[in-house]
Amino acid sequence: MLFIDRDGCLIEEPADEQIDSYDKLRLMPGVIPALLALKQAGFRFVMVSNQDGLGTAAFPQEHFDGPHRLLLQILGSQGIEFDAIHIDPSLPEDHSPNRKPGVGMVLDYLRDPGLDRTHSAVIGDRETDLQLAANMGLKGYRVGPQGQDWAAVAAAILATPRTGRVERNTAETGIRVAVNLDAPKPIRIETGIGFFDHMLEQIAAHAGFSLELDCRGDLHVDEHHTVEDCALALGAALDEALSDRTGIGRYGFVLPMDESLAKVTVDLSGRPVFVLHGEFPRESVGGLHTEMVSHFFASLAQTLRCAIHIELSGENTHHLVEACFKGVGRALRPALSRGTTAGVPSTKGLL
């Protein structure tokens, strides 16, 4: 969600600070292409504006309605619409909670647990807009003479890295995971199982995202809980970083590993499925039971909400396992990439 001011932000603010005629209405330079780029990336818009004394003799409602209707028509003709428009008429001396930087007009959004606070932001032309952003716990961007132009603001918002952070604590394991889909490093992993650490490194390195994962598990029992819970936590962190999955590639394909072959396909569909065709010749490799490989990917698919299909052939168990992890990483790389599609990559409009 982007919470956008009106005067001085969407339209140039006249000297008298009131748009009361059509000939005074001037769009801010670059606002339409910037909003279109943000819309394509999946952002939705809410207008939040103070209009001092609106509805009084000093600022009759009819002086506001005509130009405002024209503004919405111009933006609407370009495909730019607002989920909601909040206009507050109070004066400074009213001390209204709806006056920015008060959060009265946006309380419903702050109460919504579905609000993506990492990527949502406030855009305005005044210091009070930046203070509103701080009060909402969001980033703030200032446009106009004392800030940036719309192109720079849109570029900065679109460059916000996609990150996810998950802590998972059970009676068997304690796990902390952090991912950044838009940075390849750092990759730091410690699970207590060296071979498993190496396999997780393969996923992150070949998918192109940073991964920091620390797990303290009940390895004195066996590796089952550690492997399963690491998969669940990693999938949840990736799912958080993907947000609503707008603009991603969604699909990924591959991976030969010497004499072994793993054909891997991934679909970030929002629906968890894992299918494995093939067998591992040995029961374990590097302290990791091979039955846990399929369990790992099934658990990853569950919390990442994706379909993973793997076809295996070959004789070297080490190479087969490694081909699975590298192949999933390579398949995830194009699937996680953003800017690949416009909007959500689904005819249903939702993943």
Image: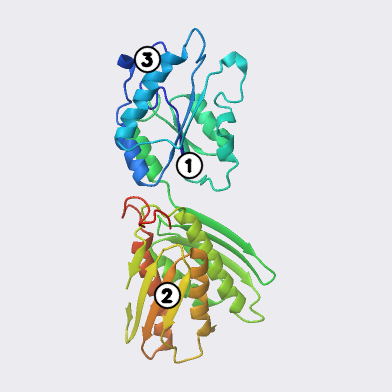
Quadrant location of the C terminus in the rendered image? bottom left
The alpha-carbon separation of the residues under discs 1 and 2 comes to 34 Å
Q: Which one is nearer the viewer's eye here, 50 or 333?
A: 50
Q: Amino acid at mark 2?
A: Phe
Q: Secondary structure at mark 3?
A: loop
Mark 2 crowdedness (10 Å alpha carbons): few <14, some 14-19, many ≥20: many
Q: Which mark is residue 254?
A: none
Tell me, yes or no, whether the two marked residues, 1 and 2, touch with CB atoms within 8 Å. Answer: no
Q: Choose between 177 and 85: the one closer to the eye.
A: 85
Look at the numbered discs 2 and 3 and tell me whether their residues touch, using CB distance below 8 Å.
Answer: no
Relative horizontal placement of residue 291, taking residue 260 as reference (left or right): right
- Which amino acid does the dot numbered 1 rest on? Ser
Position of residue 291 measured from the top left corner of the image (x, y, whole percent): 52, 84
State the residue position of label 3: 14
Q: Residue at x 62, y 82 (%)?
A: 222
Whichever of callouts 1 and 2 sits on the residue coming sooner in the sequence is 1
Distance from disc 3 to disc 1, alpha carbons, whole Å, reads 29 Å
Q: Nearer the viewer, mark 1 or mark 2?
A: 1
Expressed as whole percent of the image width and height from the top left, the position of residue 308 reads: 42, 72
Using the image, tell me which numbered label, if any, was put on residue 325.
2
Q: CA distance from mark 2 to mark 3?
A: 60 Å
Find residue 98 and report its image quarter: top right
10 Å neighbourhood of mark 3: few (<14), some, or many (≥20)?
some
| Residue at 40% over, 56% down | 183
Task: Say what amino acid the circle numbered 3 marks.
Answer: Pro
Q: Position of residue 190 (x, y in %)?
A: 55, 69
- The residue beneath circle 1 is 120
Labels 2 and 3: the sequence-earlier one: 3
